[in-house]
Image (cartoon, rainbow, N blue to C red):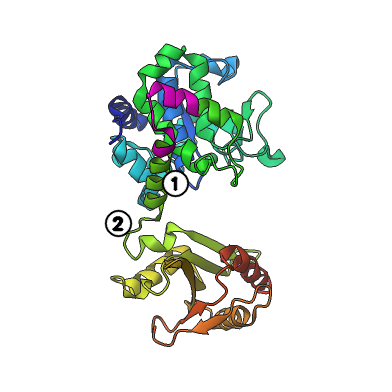
Amino acid sequence: MFFKLLRMNSYLKNIKSVSKNVTDILAVMGNESVDLDSAVSSISLAYHLSNFGISSRIIPDSKRSKSYNILPIINCKKEHLPLKTEVTYWLKEHGIELDSLICKDELNVDSSVKNFILVDHHVSAYHEKVVSVLDHRPYDEKSMLKKECIVNIQEIGSCATLVLEAIKNDLNTEDIKKDESLLHFLYGPIILDTINYSKDADKVRELDFEMTDIIEKALSIVNIEETRKSIFKALIDARADVSCLNSLQILSKDLKIVSNKDSTVKVAMSGLHVFEYPFMNDAAANVKVFADQENIDVIMFMGMKPVDDTVERHLAVMDIKNKNLYDDIIKTVESMKNPDLKLALNEDIKFLDGKFYSQGNVKASRKQILPVIRDLLQTY
Ligand SMILES: [Mn+2]
């Protein structure tokens, strides 16, 4: 049971309906992964600025007088939004319809967006038009941001923390408390990105605690530990919940693509339940559709499954259109030494003439395997 953001939903619907006919757009955009932090930060900041106006702390005076139409842009294609299951869960719980959002393929971004505020990233193809940045990753020299751009980068747990700080700077404490639903909306990504304020994870910083304190006081939360824990668990569960995805969508849910230097040869690595995928509806046909769309030569599946109090790891390799590369990858993963994957072939699964393995070394993940495959690809 959460607070519904009804006013925000009507703002989004409204701005979406006018967005097609205007050109003086100020877009608040998150990063391409469209994680919860990016989505919530861009929506919340756009909503706040369109309600309360833009202060000189956010946008330089020279750019501020314009009568902008302020809107959030979700930095992925509309068809990929359902893959961000923790985002769709959190929006739904707060009464925001997915259709109210503007994804980047629903707008002619190049011609209608005059300026950008970037949240949760600061390296962007649109750097020439960026007037403001709120980000929590280390400053990247390659960002090529303009001199007059206002850059608020603080290496803290969550960008949502910076958004709340910006809102707090515009309002007095009493006014902040009035928008309980917005505060609760921002609470989620702060909890998720700080790994529930975990000391071990070492993501959380003082400002995250300060903003959390504002939220928890305003919402009169008594059982702080319990409340944080239950939101954290709900978001983790939602992120892992692929039950509403079909066998095509699931291939892109947790995807990395590696290629050779000129991107002419590509290997896709999809994170999914390896031994269950072949039995999903239209699995074989959808692997081909996906490989065709992404122009993939070889596809690999990698997955981890909790079993009792330990985990199993599985790996699969399938050839799409490059038998040589397929053979090389099989040879590579079977004989890898650093780390040794300890692969055991599963002869029971017959799927697209590929090879399915149990991976005895459960510590080796895609993080270790990906660079090895990338190196191999450089010889192609
Ligand atoms: Mn973030």
Could you say where residue 307 lies in the image, as x and y percent from the top left? 42, 69
Write the residue at 38% across / 28% down. 221
Q: Quadrant of the C terminus?
A: bottom right
Q: Is mark 2 within 8 Å of ligand 1?
A: no
Question: Does the magenta run of residues contain 292?
Answer: no
Seen from this angle, which residue lies furthest right?
141
In the foreground, 317 or 302: 302
Q: Which residue is mark 2?
A: 244
In the foreground, 24 or 83: 83
Q: Is residue 129 visible?
A: no
Could you say where residue 203 lies in the image, as x and y percent from the top left? 59, 41
Quadrant position of residue 222:
top left
N-terminal-most mark, 1 or 2: 1
Instruction: State the predominant SS element of the stretch in magenta.
Output: helix
Indicate whether 85 appears above or below 374: above
Q: Which residue is mark 1?
A: 76
- Local secondary structure at mark 2: loop
- Identity of the amino acid at label 1? Cys
Could you say where residue 166 lies in the image, as x and y percent from the top left? 52, 22
Could you say where residue 155 lies in the image, as x and y percent from the top left? 64, 35
Q: Quadrant of the N terminus?
A: top left
Write the residue at 35% across / 37% down. 101
Q: Which residues are magenta?
A: 212-226
- Cα separation, mark 1 vs mark 2, equals 19 Å
In the foreground, 190 or 308: 308
- Identity of the amino acid at label 2? Cys
Quadrant position of residue 351:
bottom left
Q: From the viewer's perspective, is 100 left or right of 301?
A: left
Seen from this angle, which residue lies furthest bottom?
347
